[in-house]
């Protein structure tokens, strides 16, 4: 049996997925770790996909006829493995030598049996450390994010932990889902990722539930992954923003109740929308004004904050909490 099941979800990022699979096998050989790689192709109709991925290294490839969402695809991939450790790895993330071995050692250490999730150090394409950990969000954090506090306090890294906090291994509230190691027994006992999250916040929710179950989320400085970021979602920023807002509202409803979700919905409509439009008009913001308008048009036309979101190929996503 393999030491680690590596689950990769592809959506319109075939070239990244090929590199990701190749790196996973290369690092596994260097680390002396056996991996079982599972690739879920989430509706990408690239006719050469299976051939090019298979050429990068041995992998179980599953073709979904439509985009089922990130969390659902991760659950699908995890169900095809048997290893004690599962690594959910974004296709635009590349493992560094030593990362697999180091994480295996943490999970095998009798002194750290209460560690349920491990998140490696994340670096960007320039090898600069990226803020990848944060505390578990409170309702106030979600409200502040909706009015742009994360941009006003960008220098501090909010809502992520500071770079100083990323200078050593430590317990954290949440790790980034781009590279997330978890014990299989824990993952299965929690029912996997909550599939009500189509994209975004599924990792936040999983980390919160892991800690509620009495396990720890741990940032491991001595393991490293290079992450490009937004290889799939950047293809349609308006849709990505709509999905992000929907997932934020879903998370709020699950963890803080319907009343909190209603409050956040009002804030999102009456404050976040004009703030985002103003930022776009001044040349700021990650999403241009056309993308912002598209995002809110999608949300409003689908019974904001619940309903059905139409994906690029027309597949519906039921976003009802």
Image (cartoon, rainbow, N blue to C red):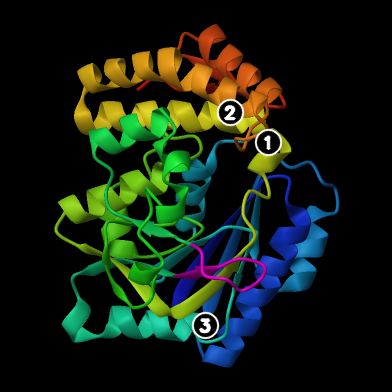
The residue tagged 1 is 65
Position in image of residue 82 (x %, y %): 42, 67
Mark nearest the camera among 3 and 2 is 2
Q: Is residue 52 left or right of residue 203?
A: right
Residue 305 visible in the current orientation: no
If you read the primary sequence from the N terminus, does the residue marked by circle 2 or circle 1 appear first? 1
Residue appearing at x 29%, y 83% in the figure: 108
**What numbered label is drawn on residue 34?**
3
* Residue range highlighted in magenta: 121-130
If you read the primary sequence from the N terminus, does the residue marked by circle 3 or circle 2 appear first? 3
Q: Compared with residue 37, is residue 47 higher up or lower down, i.e. above or below?
A: above
Say few, some or many: other residues with alpha carbon within 10 Å of mark 3 (under 14 / 14 to 19 / 20 or more).
some
**What numbered label is drawn on residue 279?**
2
- Between marks 2 and 1, how big is the CA–CA gap? 38 Å
Residue appearing at x 64%, y 27% in the figure: 280
Say few, some or many: other residues with alpha carbon within 10 Å of mark 2 (under 14 / 14 to 19 / 20 or more).
some
């Amino acid at each position: 049996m393999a030491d680690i099941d590596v689950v990769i979800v592809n959506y319109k990022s075939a070239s990244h997925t090929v590199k990701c699979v190749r790196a996973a096998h290369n690092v596994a050989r260097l680390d002396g770790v056996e991996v079982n790689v599972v690739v879920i192709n989430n509706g990408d109709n690239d006719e050469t996909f299976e051939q090019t991925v298979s050429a990068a290294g041995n992998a179980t490839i599953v073709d979904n006829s439509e985009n089922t969402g990130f969390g659902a695809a991760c659950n699908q991939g995890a169900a095809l493995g048997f290893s004690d450790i599962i690594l959910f790895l974004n296709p635009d993330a590349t493992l560094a030598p030593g990362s697999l071995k180091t994480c295996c050692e943490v999970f095998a250490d009798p002194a750290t049996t209460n560690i349920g999730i491990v998140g490696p150090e994340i670096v960007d394409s320039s090898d600069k450390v990226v803020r990848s950990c944060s505390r578990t969000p409170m309702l106030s954090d979600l409200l502040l994010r909706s009015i742009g506090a994360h941009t006003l306090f960008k220098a501090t890294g909010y809502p992520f932990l500071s770079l100083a906090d990323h200078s050593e291994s430590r317990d954290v509230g949440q790790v980034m889902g781009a590279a997330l190691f978890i014990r299989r027994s824990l993952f299965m006992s929690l029912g996997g990722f909550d599939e009500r999250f189509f994209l975004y916040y599924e990792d936040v929710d999983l980390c919160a539930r892991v800690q509620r179950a009495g396990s720890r989320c741990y940032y491991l400085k001595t393991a490293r992954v290079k992450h490009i970021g937004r290889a799939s979602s950047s293809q349609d920023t308006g849709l990505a923003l709509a999905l992000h807002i929907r997932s934020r509202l879903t998370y709020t409803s699950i963890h803080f109740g319907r009343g909190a979700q209603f409050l956040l919905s009002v804030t999102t409509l009456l404050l976040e929308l004009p703030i985002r439009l103003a930022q776009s008009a001044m040349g700021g913001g990650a999403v241009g004004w056309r993308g912002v308008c598209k995002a809110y048009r999608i949300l409003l036309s689908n019974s904001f904050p619940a309903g059905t979101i139409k994906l690029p190929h027309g597949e519906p996503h039921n976003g009802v909490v």
